Image: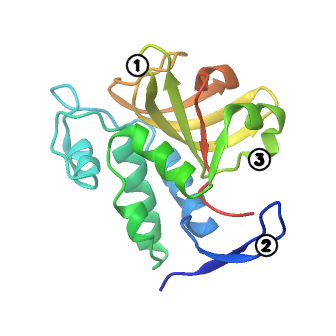
Amino acid sequence: MMSYIYIIPQNNNIYLQEEKNMKKEIAILAADDALANVGVTEEQKDNHGKAIKIYLQTVGLTEGYAWCAAFLKYRFMQAANELNEELSEEFLDLTGYTPDWKIYAEKHDIWIPIEQARLNNNLIKKGYVALFYSSSKKRIYHTGIVISSSKDGFITVEGNTGPGPGVEADGDGVFKKKRTWKMLGTEGGFMKTYWG
């Protein structure tokens, strides 16, 4: 059963909108579970392995594909399952293509652009999704789940990355990363996964 929230836009008209983000408990548990999975790595070949295969299945892909978004989707799905909660059908339709996550966030007015986040780091909560933009690719190209934020940046857990300090979108494992705001790129930002 889908819940509804009251939206009061700037012109003070009140209307109902189907809620497209999840319960806070799901997002927090997903972040905790992601943290507990730091150290999971690929096996034998690039973008292969027992865990990677399971992540990629959530987005309808087989081994061999980039899996940062699949890792997040799996974590959210597992958390919802553990809590006996449901995620929206539209969220469950999210693919492993990272630009789709920004499109989803903008469509449902749950997008927080880098400029807003940098000005007020309190907007960024544990369990939100960080989306990194590449100026050379001209698109969102990597993602992670937020663990915490501060005035200097934020901490994430990311799949399909490496242990180094840069944004590596084709690494070999799950790592906890310390990020500066600048690392999000000019069009990067966050997907708000819950209200409050």
Residue ID at (57%, 81%): 3
Between disc 1 and disc 3, the foreground one is 1
Q: What's the amino acid at mark 2?
A: Asn
Q: Upstream in the sequence, badge 1 or badge 2?
A: 2
Q: Residues within 10 Å of mark 1 (few under 14, many from 20)?
A: few
Of residues 7 and 155, the one nearer the viewer is 7
Quarter of the image for residue 159 reads: top left
Q: Are marks 1 and 2 in contact (CB under 8 Å)?
A: no
Of the numbered discs in the image, which one, if any, rests on residue 13? 2
Residue farthest to the bottom, as pictured = 1
Q: Residue 11 at what x, y percent from top left?
A: 83, 64
Closer mark to the observer between disc 1 and disc 2 = 2
Q: Nearer the viewer, mark 2 or mark 3?
A: 2
Q: Which residue is mark 1?
A: 137
Q: Nearer the viewer, residue 64 or 113?
A: 113
| Secondary structure type for disc 2 | loop
The x, y position of residue 38, in whole percent, is 45, 39
What type is the residue that disc 1 sits on? Lys
Q: Residue at x 32, y 26 (%)?
A: 172
For label 1, the SS is: loop
Q: Do the numbered discs 2 and 3 sit on residues whose CB atoms are within 8 Å?
A: no
Please, what secondary structure does the residue beneath circle 3 have? helix
* Kind of residue at badge 3: Leu
Q: Nearer the viewer, residue 138 or 98?
A: 138
Residue beneath disc 3: 123
Vertical arrangement, residue 139 with respect to residue 113, above or below = above
- Position of residue 109 relative to residue 184, above or below, is below
Q: Is residue 121 left or right of residue 132?
A: right
Tell me which label, 2 or 3, sits earlier in the chain. Answer: 2
Residue 109 percent location from the top left of the image: 62, 55
